Image (cartoon, grey):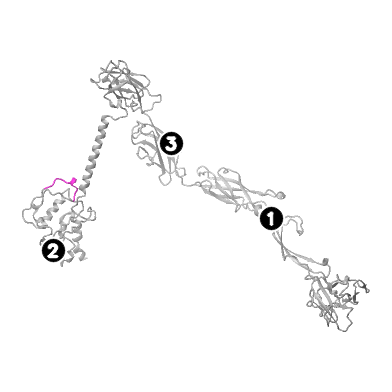
Amino acid sequence: MMITYHCFWLLFWVGQPHQSFSSPLSKRTRGFPEKEKVLELSGNNRKELTRSKRSWMWNQFFLLEEYTGSDYQYVGKLHSDQDRGDGSLKYILSGDGAGDLFIINENTGDIQATKRLDREEKPVYILRAQAINRRTGRPVEPESEFIIKIHDINDNEPMFTKDVYNASVPEMSDVGIIKTALLNMDRENREQYQVVIQAKDMGGQMGGLSGTTTVNITLTDVNDNPPRFPQSTYQYKTPESAPPESPIGRIKANDADMGENAEIEYSITEGDGSDMFGVITDKDTQEGIITVKKALDFEKKKLYTLKVEATNTHVDPRFLYLGPFKDFTTVRILVEDVDEPPVFSRPAYILEVKEDVAINSIIGTVTAQDPDVAKNLVKYSVDRHTDMDRVFNINSGNGSIFTSKPLDRETLLWHNITVIAAEINNPKQSSRVPVFIKILDVNDNAPEFAMFYETFVCENAKAEQLIQTLSAVDKDDSFSGHQFSFSLAPEATSGSNFTIQDNRDNTAGIFTRRNRYNRHEMSTYLLPVVISDSDYPVQSSTETVTIRVCACDRRGKMQSCNAEALIHPTGLSTGALIAILLCIIILLVTVVLFAALKRQRKKEPLIISKEDIRDNIVSYNDEGGGEEDTQAFDIGTLRNPEAIEDNKLRRDIVPEALFMPRRTPAVRDNTDVRDFINQRLKENDTDPTAPPYDSLATYAYEGNGSVAESLSSLESVTTDGDQDYDYLSDWGPRFKKLADMYGSVDSDKDS
């Protein structure tokens, strides 16, 4: 490193004086300054040499942006005091843009800018300059740093951050930054506005640049419009059968506002139908829906008039001066007539009838009328699902209910039936009403013992001794209470061993009439007691009290008597044991009979078939080889009726249903098989024990070698000639089906 530093000169040409920085672009300086500014440094860097008119610092230089000349823009000159002009020194430039944007003449030290500079892209460049010995490559001066600042010129117009701005302002608003030019701007008249904004620099002076942008302004809504009905009167029709909550029609008040400012609430304020109809608001469409609240009746009222109000739910107090934010309209509703079912005069009927009323007596009347203007006639009937026993009936013309069977209050106190009233011209129009019939009591039941009385008397009993207290009940009702009287039956009053004492409280006592009783002489006494009531007509009954004579101790406690049930109340009497034993015997006999009957039914029937023999043609596949077949059925059996065993039972009928076997008259002469079959046919036609009805018994025991031709249809197709089956028609109704099958062969062939 060199101890002694030599000074070098930096000579820069500056484009313009400072006061020209704010001058217009059209007056840019394209040449070099008239006077050169030179900076000289001493070796020790302590002594400054200053030339005249130097107004800038040595390490900071200025250069105008956007140079438009054809040549490179001159920046300055680098000169060292070691340079003697012999070309031994070389100047080097490094730093921002060195070699590309800024170049230096290595011999002269002149620095130039090769491109147009833009301050908005880079306002400052930092460079370093150095002088070196060309031969040795060593620096002759220390490296110096300097700054080049780019001076701004008005070369950029104002730019908005957005191409288009969107803004909104409430209608009727006061001043803002962007002012409204018109008073009371109304969104309902015009909602969108488009404004072009221009911005100029240099305070708008001549030569300044400008930029523009577009602002879309939307007027937001306020509630400055009241709702208004488009018409003053609405008219709707509804049938009288419309159910509650059903809609009738819709009304709508128009509101020029938007959103919640256009929300409307509807209500009925006046009218003769305010209690019959209602109105609700449809939040989606802002319509008022007229609905039915109560059942309508065309015959009572045909026309209703309503006054409906529409009100804004969100009112802005600032615009109340415009008037009330509500409106009214009139709604007229016409009720249409509908064919209605008959209407009963009451919702339910309660009838009363005495239980001893005669059959076909009228017990009450129900009435129903057609509510329509036509007043159609009505017919009545009883719903038989509510009167399965058909105890009551009704006159279909006048609705009078009468009895058709005897009544009994003790069996059924209430009868609940349903009466149907239907229009004669249109039976589908019908209505129903419940009828509750109460059966009133009549004293038709005699009093009877409250329980079965079986008591005993001791052999050592004394006279006038109480042995049993009796009480009675009556199925009938008594409004004043039952009053029963007890007495001995007339046939027992004389010579009775016991007496009855009426206690006048619906009870009576049985007392002994003599001293001592002997159970060996008389073990049981049957005491008839007459019980009577006090109602009209008086009813009485005779009840029997069983009194057994028993041996007792001194204190009257029973020890033994013939009534085992009294001694052992938890055991069974002899009669009960005998009854149980008889039941067991009957059950065993029934089981044995059932088993025997089942075994008899399992016997093989005469006809074996996979199908039920009733109402079917039974096939006998028993044909053999005729007379030549010794293992087949003996044809002689058919020719000799005497060989038939009289005592042989039929196997195709249940034995229990058989009549006594009948003897068949023997045919002495040798008849033809056909005559024999005809005889059998007549017998079967008149025989009540013949096989099941519509059954066909086929006799086909002949084989191929039989003289008599086979009756089977299985081999009829093998014959050469046609066979004549007309004789089948003469065999009676049981062969009619077979005659129809084979007797019409000729006619079929002729056709």
Q: Which residue is mark 2?
A: 704
Residue type marked 2: Asn
**Can I make out residue 474 in this image?**
yes
Residue type marked 1: Asp
Q: Residues within 10 Å of mark 2 (few under 14, many from 20)?
A: some
**Secondary element type, mark 3:** strand
- Alpha carbon separation for disc pair 2 and 3: 88 Å
Q: Nearer the viewer, mark 1 or mark 2?
A: 2
Left/right placement of residue 340 relative to residue 258 reads left
Across and down, in percent, residue 5 comes to 88, 75
Residue type marked 3: Tyr
Q: Viewer-proximal residue, 316 or 160?
A: 160
Identify the mark nearer the N-term, 1 or 2.
Answer: 1
Across and down, in percent, residue 603 comes to 19, 50
- In the image, residue 686 above or below residue 514: below
- Alpha carbon separation for disc pair 3 and 1: 66 Å
Q: Residues within 10 Å of mark 3 (few under 14, many from 20)?
A: some
Identify the mark nearer the N-term, 2 or 3.
Answer: 3
Magenta-span inclusion, residue 657: yes
Across and down, in percent, residue 701 comes to 14, 59
Q: Which residue is mark 1?
A: 221
Q: Viewer-proximal residue, 258 or 68?
A: 68
Q: Viewer-proximal residue, 165 or 290?
A: 165
Q: Which mark is residue 349?
A: 3
Q: Quadrant of the N terminus?
A: bottom right
Residue range in magenta is 652-662
